[in-house]
Amino acid sequence: MRFPDIFRRKKKKAVDSAPALTKKNKVALCLGGGGARGFAHIGALKAFEENGIEFDLCAGTSAGSLVGAFYCAGISPNQLAAYSHEINLKDVKPNSMFIPSDPLNIGEIFTRRMGNMYIEDMLRPFYCVSVDLVSGKQIIFDKGPVKEAVSASCCVPLIFKPLVIGDMHLIDGGVLNNIPASVCRMFGADKVVTVDVNPTRGGGTNELGTIDVLKGMFSIMSAHTSVDGLRLSDVVISVDTAEYSSAKKDGYEEMMRRGYETTMQKIEEIKALFI
């Protein structure tokens, strides 16, 4: 199935989604980090919508926090896919790779579409993860401006300046918790569905360039900070994005398509969690 077919508006009178599933369990959606590979999350959301799957809460790290924020704010997968065409990563990272950029540029992706929303005003509970460089502890955002929360969660060290909020110097949540299933459990989830857009993490590099070394370092680190999250998930949707860069938009339509198709392969398993 080609990408345009997935998100194409239907010409006939038909609903884009199935009736919501009746459920007994509190089921959470966990969206992992992965940089630009996070476009695959949008395809997963489309598959959920088509099958009437509505989650009780959502937790996200890094790119997963940005997509999760849109999901919890009520934007449809079709709208999010259309908006993705407008996103220019150079607006997010205008400086040279060696000059850290303003992390609030990340949150602007959300506010340009949704305005200055607060987490408390979202349609469903939303949590995103960051790390405080001062204390070394995980910080969970469950209230306050979405722009700040998402910016902190996506604040990749050295690529962006730490986001200073009060006494905290906040960086990317993937440093400690790249698959935040533990956060879903913490806030009452009985079952957790995880979308992992970076399942091939862990490989290093034999290149000595600064960027290559950074990528290798983050890949190794991500592998270690994803173990617990994968273990705490009831269903893991592993989307193959290995051939695409986490720092470039190239292939974003294909990543969305893969997110959709990989999720569809797990749909019956996911539906069973609601019973």
Image (cartoon, grey):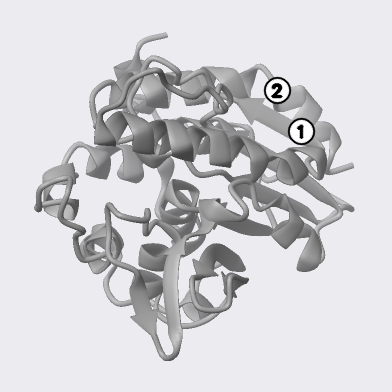
Viewed as shown, does residue 95 lie left or right of 250? Answer: left
Please say whether residue 52 is visible from this viewpoint: no
Amino acid of disc 1: Val
Nearest the camera: 195 or 224?
Answer: 224
* Contact (Cβ within 8 Å) of mark 2 with mark 1: yes
Q: Give how far across and how far down residue 257 sits, in percent.
A: 42, 20
Residue drawn at x 53%, y 22% is 203
Measured in 3D between alpha carbons, the distance from the residue under mark 2 to the one under mark 1, in whole angstroms, is: 8 Å
Q: Is residue 78 above or below residue 10?
A: below
Residue drawn at x 15%, y 55% is 99
Residue drawn at x 50%, y 71% is 122
Viewed as shown, does residue 184 lie left or right of 190? Answer: left
- Total numbered badges shown on the rendered structure: 2
On-image quarter of the C terminus: top right
Residue drawn at x 66%, y 40% is 224
Answer few, some or many: residues within 10 Å of disc 2's Cα (few below 14, many 20 plus, some between 14 and 19). some
Please say whether residue 110 is visible from this viewpoint: yes
Q: Which residue is mark 2?
A: 266
Q: Give how far across and how far down residue 154 sits, in percent.
A: 40, 56
Helix or strand or loop: what does disc 1 sit on? strand
Q: Which label is found at residue 235?
A: 1
Q: Give how far across and how far down residue 208 sits, in percent.
A: 30, 26
Nearest the camera: 275 or 91?
Answer: 91
Furthest residue in direction front, as rendered:
208
Lower position in the chain sequence, tag 2 or tag 1: 1
Select label 2 or label 1 by which is in front: 1
